[in-house]
Image (cartoon, helix red, strand yellow):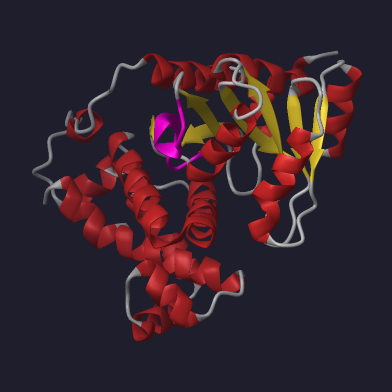
Amino acid sequence: MIPHELVSKYVIPYLRGLVASQLIEEGVSQVAISKLLGITQPMVRKYLSSGRKYFVVKLKEAGIPEDEIEAIAKVLANTALRGGKYDLYRVFSQIVNSILSRLLLCDFHRSIDPSVPKDCNLCSILFPQVTDPYIEDVKAAFKLLQSISKACTLVPEVGMNIVRASPNASRPEDVVGFTGRIIKVSSKLVAVGEPTYGGSKHTATVLLTIRDKWPSINAIVVIKYDEGFVERFERLGLRLLFSGPHKKREEFFSDLRRSIEGAEKVPDVIVDYGGVGLEPVIYVLGESAVEAVRKALLVITSP
């Protein structure tokens, strides 16, 4: 059984069922779920009848940590709600590739196919690394995050992201970001997906909106909203800009533009109060991804 057969039988159906369960909890109808997941409504009903716990157990048996399973479900459901079917498929594919490349399924694979060599590392080399200065900047920023033990306290409910624009970026496809986001698994940070161009549509668009006025801002790291973090940034002397709360999801970018237009100086941090269907978060800005992460880490490392 090749790796893609393995995930098609023992991972993808259970992830899909888990996403259906998550979307139902978010108030999405079965008809809408069937369209988002590309399956029939009777199949959605079948998934829901199995119960959320069933899918978690099956994915744990395959080798995926429970904390990561729950985080993945939230990331996929949020992607479906925010970006629709295309973005969901893109992030779903990146998450599956990440699960394979991190060798999470190896023991399970050998348990059902003893012919798999004990030293097999095929999945870790199936997806070639791309050398690119902006991708490398994002990778370095993530490694910096991972080096700080308390960095997991910065992760929003639906996952963290780091984005980096190329010099002449004018569309989300010109911005590097993690497709599957960065999630908290126990007390560790795990990147679900690789940093790629076009990896994060929403956060990339936030960055491009900011760059319309301040081209020197090339990167953003998204951290969770916390009043303590806001107060700490202020005490450290960083410049803060505020946006929201948003009455409608569609008003997010118009509200952000108004806040930007009213600011005279380049901010270090944009605090977004969220709104209907939008989690409040904090956007930390920088001329590079590493600089943005260093600023974000100040809230947990400064005295």
Instruction: Residue 150: say if magenta.
Output: no
Q: Is residue 5 above or below residue 170?
A: below
Quarter of the image containing the C terminus? top right
Relative to 48, is 232 on the left or the right?
right
In the image, 80 versus 203, the foreground residue is 203
User: Residue drawn 29% across and 35% down?
Assistant: 101
User: Residue drawn 71% across and 62% down?
Assistant: 248
Instruction: Residue 179: say if magenta.
Output: yes
Relative to 194, is 111 on the left or the right?
left
Q: Is residue 124 above or below residue 45?
A: above
* Quadrant of res 89: bottom left
Q: Number of callouts in the render?
A: 0
* Quadrant of res 46: bottom left
In the image, 30 versus 270, the foreground residue is 270
Residue extending farthest left? 115
In the image, 143 versus 116, the foreground residue is 143
Q: Position of residue 61 (x, y in %)?
A: 37, 55
User: Residue drawn 75% across and 57% down?
Assistant: 275
Relative to 246, is 140 on the left or the right?
left
Relative to 40, is 286 on the left or the right?
right
Q: Which residues are magenta?
A: 169-181
Q: Position of residue 224 (x, y in %)?
A: 71, 39
Q: Is residue 199 visible?
A: no
Q: Position of residue 41 (x, y in %)?
A: 38, 83
User: Residue drawn 60% across and 27% down?
Assistant: 211
Q: Position of residue 57 (x, y in %)?
A: 44, 61
Residue extending farthest bottom? 42
Q: Is residue 227 visible?
A: yes
